[in-house]
Image (spheres, helix red, strand yellow):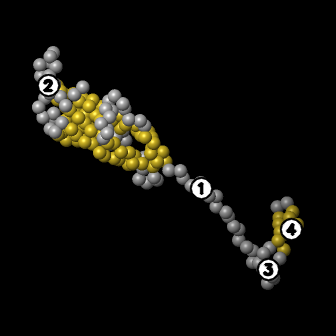
Amino acid sequence: MSLRITDFDGVNLLEQPPEEVSIVATAVVGGRATVQCRIIEDGTLPYDYVTGTVFWDDGSRPVVYNGTTSGTLTIDTFRNLQPGDYVVRVEAHNYDTIPPDCGRPYWNTVSVNFAFEVRPLNQEPVKTPIIFGPIAPSRMGGSAHASFSGAKKGCMRVSV
């Protein structure tokens, strides 16, 4: 195959797709999902013109990387994603060699999926507030602490 997508170490991602990556998201920013790959064309057409497109699977528009005639396009990008599961697709495009039955060059596309699981940051447990009642003031000039005794149904007597 003349058009391929590799990682930065040269591993062909069409043959060995990348594994799912788990990311921890912060409260406001989200989790940083990084996509790094190279689109390589080593076919027989002159200039080996290639372009790339990244689909982030977050509702945004695809990001198109302008074509290059060097035969290799490097994509090194990231996006902050909110908690959830994402499948980010990278597509590689080029004009491929002329097949015998076609008679002219044709547009070729291959793609690789990058899976991300973005988990929320472990939040601190919600602390239950402690409610303190008012301290009854002393009416007789004694202690401000009251003791409760002799309560009848529906009524309570306070003694100082």
> Which residue carries the number 1 mark?
126
Which is more N-terminal, label 2 or label 4? Answer: 2
What is the CA distance from the residue labelled 4 to the residue labelled 2? Answer: 98 Å
**Which amino acid type corresponds to the residue marked 3 in the rendered image?**
Ser
Residue 59 location in percent, x, y?
Answer: 35, 41
> Which residue carries the number 4 mark?
149
Which is more N-terminal, label 3 or label 1? Answer: 1
User: In this rendering, which labeled residue sits more in front, label 3 or label 4?
Assistant: 3
Residue found 18% across the figure and 36% down from its top: 71
**Which amino acid type corresponds to the residue marked 4 in the rendered image?**
Ser
Which is more N-terminal, label 4 or label 3? Answer: 3
Residue 41 location in percent, x, y?
Answer: 20, 32
- Image vertical order of residue 25 relative to residue 92, above or below: below
Can see residue 62? Answer: no
Residue at the outermost front position:
9
Residue at the outermost right position:
150
- Per the image, label 4 sits on a secondary structure element best described as strand
Residue found 82% across the figure and 71% down from its top: 147
> Which residue carries the number 3 mark?
143
Comparing 67 with 13, the one in front is 13
Crowding around mark 2 (Cα neighbors within 10 Å: few <14, some 14 to 19, many 20+) is few
What is the CA distance from the residue labelled 4 to the residue labelled 1? Answer: 35 Å
**Which amino acid type corresponds to the residue marked 1 in the rendered image?**
Val
Q: Do the numbered discs 4 and 2 sit on residues whose CB atoms are within 8 Å? A: no
Which is more N-terminal, label 1 or label 4? Answer: 1
Q: Do the numbered discs 3 and 2 sit on residues whose CB atoms are within 8 Å? A: no
What is the CA distance from the residue labelled 3 to the residue labelled 4? Answer: 16 Å
User: In this rendering, which labeled residue sits more in front, label 4 or label 2?
Assistant: 2
